[in-house]
Amino acid sequence: MIVVDQLTKHYADLRRGRLVALDGISFRARQGEIYGLLGPNGAGKTTALRVLSTVLKPTSGRATVNGYDVLTQSSQVRHQIGFMSANTAVYDRMTAWEMVEYFGRLHGIQDERLRERMETLFARLQMNDIRDLLGAKMSTGMKQKVSIARSIIHDPPVVIFDEATAGLDVLVARALLNTVAELRDQGKCIIFSTHIMREVEKLCDRAAIIHRGKVLAEGPLDALREAHGEQDLEELFFQLILDHDRADEVAP
Amino acid sequence: MSWSNVRLILAREIRDQLRDRRTLFMIVVLPILLYPLLGMTFFQVAQFMKEQPTRVLVVGARHLAEEPPLVVNERFAPELFDEPDKADLLELVFEPSEPLGPRAVRVDPLERAHEAVTSREYDAALYIPPDFAERLEEFREASLAAASGEPSEGKKTKTAPAALPAVPKPEIIFTTANERSQITFVRLQKVLRRWSEEVGKRNLAAAGVAPETARPFDLGTADLASQTGNRGTAIWSKILPVMLLLWALTGAFYPAVDLCAGEKERGTLETLLSSPAERSEIVLGKLVTVMLFSVVTVILNLASIGLTGWLIMAKLPGLGAPPWTSIIWLLLALLPVSALFSALCLALAAFAKSTKEGQYYLMPLLLVTMPLAIFPLAPGVTLTLGNSLIPVTNVVLLLRSTLEGNYQEALRYVLPVVGVTLVGCLLAIRWAVDQFNKESVLFRESERLDLGLWLRHLLRDRQPTPTVAAAAFCGVLILVVKFFVGLAMPEPTDFVGLAKAAIATQLVVIATPALLMTIFFTNRPSRTLLLDRRSWRAELPLAVAAAAVLAVVLHPVAMAISVAIVDLYPVTKEVEASFKNLMGQTPDFWQLLLIAAVLPALCEELAFRGFILSGFRHVGRKWRAIVLSAVFFGFAHGILQQSISACLMGVVLGFLAVQTGSLIPCIVYHATHNALALTAAQITPGLLNESPFLNFIVRRGPDGAFACYKLPLVVLAVVLALMILTWFGRLRYEKTEEERLQEAIQRGIEAEDEPLGL
């Protein structure tokens, strides 16, 4: 379970003084659901997820993962999550097997269990033929599989996918979405950020629409459609962002 | 800190590096090939240099006498050489003595000799003046006459010896601008000296005096190098430490860049950061990897040098193989040195965005390190307290002392050298960990360099108190300005000079930069300087009084410490004399107090406990901030011995500043401390003799003057001081945001698996 409460994140910026990447966002994601973070590029999705994965520290506000505070209990938080984003690459000079094994050990999994778990994962993700392939020689799809295996090797209760389908072909993307759905069915809490509406419609139980560091709308997809009187999610998304930008222009 | 994680990261990084061909080449292949090749080249070049014959033009050879012979068969006479076959090394060409025909232009022989050398036609020229043989003969006859005729006249010889006719000098014409010419000059000079001695011997023999009279004894020499180390020891003890440093740095640099900047570039850093490994574990794992490669590089290089030296260099005269004991000392020094360099490289590499940017940092790093490594090679540079405090240089000097077998000197300075190196290591490691904790470093965007924009940002986005970087900059600025002002100012010779120097240093060098920076770079100057309303708490008057009492109580302790420091590292005679001289000239004790106690207390506290400590408080740990500010405070003192005790005092002052949140107790403590030290300096042996009380509590130095207080008093002072410090420690002090965060994280770690959350 993830609780994000009034989270803000500022960056020092030479030109503007400071850059507000997150402007007090709040949301909750429960176990056994896929929570979508929907927003255009630069909306603050990656920043929010980096804070959740403890790679970045929040400027103010709180975020907890299964009750652990991301700021003061970052180590425990990292044990609870599997994190995968466009920025978490695969090591060039390691084979698929070594890479997954390495992260499994960093999570403190014992040899016997790690081996079992790896065999299951490699079979399920159909990775046995790339076991001994170096990262440098893998295709994008293969790398994505290794990344998934790497992020769920410790069977984390919370999984965070940040723009995970970016740059993948249809086949690989579909396989990934299926894996995400499977993980949800196992009862995990999943955060799935994307700017592709179809993925949200297909996968997510609830979603937040983020723009310029603010949550514009949040809730179950059906409730969102009803509240804004718009059945098409893409239209709804456009309308919300357009309205927000207009309001900004009127009262900067 | 989980050691199994560190081990895991270490193992992975090592495997990663071993799979990289470039690293393997730099570390294994290069040294194995490099030195044998270099050695061979050097060997051959040296052979070439030694055996190369040089050409000499001899002008006026016909003016030479027959006996003793200088030239035989167009070569210098073999008996003029230690080894007769060396005569072939000087090829002689004789200038045709007479013009060939009546119409030939007559060239002045001396001019011809000069021209032969300036045109580089010959390496040197030997000019024999006309009538040389005749004049030499005249001289001989005159001296013979003097020797046989005058002893009968007795006293006359002693008062006015008969003037002997002068013999014109043969001249060697050469140029120091050319190395071959210099070598030729040395060879010629040797031969001609020997020849002139020969002439002298013959003259003595002719006068019936034994030739040995002119040189009654030879000089005996005894080179004990075989007992104290072989002949090459002196050279090896200079080469090996520099090699060690150079390779420790190179061996650390390339893996560091690949491990940090490379990981950023390949996008795997975020993967690692989101794993359960802590930042400190990541840094430590990487650091040990880098260190390992640095150590292996050095060992392989030294082994290769040693082998090459043993096989090739030992054949060169004057250079034996490196002494085997050097291995132990080099290995001992290797660990701290490579730890220092590894941490430095890691921090620099962590800052770089890409491997390309990382490679750029090698040059500045070398430019800083190499002078430090090469400076000790300058003749006459030996271990002193000052040198032993310079990082890198001190290790080279210490290594040199041990390699030369000078263990006593080494032992004396081993403490400061190890201390400085360890502190350097810790600081560098800290820096590396900090780099990994800084979001601005980890996720650095390439920003266009714009100085104006940056300055505007500094002014616009200033905080209530200075940043850590601003505090460090202020400290460095003070040190640099002080150094240059010190160079520019004349050495004070009287009290007025001293007063001027003190006022200039305190006001211009110390207070002004700190105050200007406070005004420009903070938006709450009074809070930065710990003088705002918040510092006026109810406990303040009591704290001020306690600070004054603490200064009095710590006075004997401070005296004992400075005596111990001077015992260990004596002050040079000049410094001591000039200090005594200045003290003796003080016209009025109150003026001295004003200039040497009150003024520094105000200015130095504003700078070091005001601006600098307030900035360092953002480090997040109270004691680290206090020690950092104390180190800057120490270095701002001129004499090194003074710096050490000032640094200790800086820790006490920093503690007072943090605990009370006010600068007033610090100023009072500082002024009281200085005033007491000045008062103690006024106690003369005469005064001691008169006062039984002073005599009771005081221990006298060897010169009968006041040295320090007696031990029981010092112990009592320590106990009292600890009590007062405990009282200060109990005061509730205001924590910075960073300190609160660190404490929260500490609580989070202590709570272990208990969720603290909502």
Image (cartoon, rainbow, N blue to C red):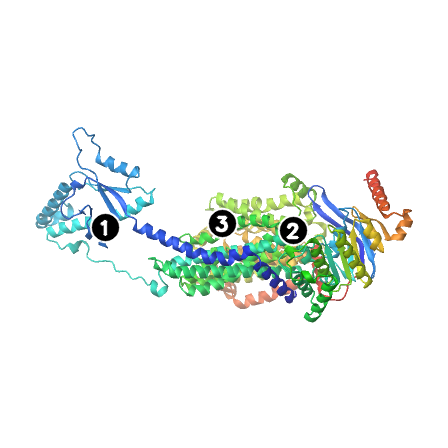
Residue B460, image x, y percentages = 70, 42
Q: Residue furthest bottom?
A: A112
**Residue named by callout 2:** B441
Q: Gap between marks 2 and 1, in whole Å?
A: 69 Å
Task: Return the chain for callout 1.
Answer: B
Q: Amino acid at mark 3?
A: Thr
Residue B742's place in the image compared with A234, above or below, is: below
Q: Using the rendered view, name the quadrant where residue A82 is placed.
A: bottom right
Residue B374, image x, y percentages = 45, 52
- On screen, residue B585 versus residue B597, left or right, reads left
Q: Residues within 10 Å of mark 1 (few under 14, many from 20)?
A: many
**Residue named by callout 3:** B586
In this view, the residue in front, B96 or B675, is B96
The N terminus of chain B - image quarter: bottom right
Which residue is rendered at x = 36% and y = 54% of the image?
Answer: B43
- On screen, residue A38 versus residue B546, left or right, reads right
- On screen, residue B608 versus residue B37, left or right, reads right
Q: Gap between marks 2 and 3, in whole Å?
A: 54 Å
Count of marks overlaid on the render: 3
**Residue named by callout 1:** B87
Instruction: For the residues labelled 2 and 3, say whether their Cβ atoms are less than 8 Å apart.
Output: no
First in sequence: mark 1 vs mark 3: 1
Task: Return the chain for callout 3.
Answer: B
Q: Residue furthest front?
A: A129
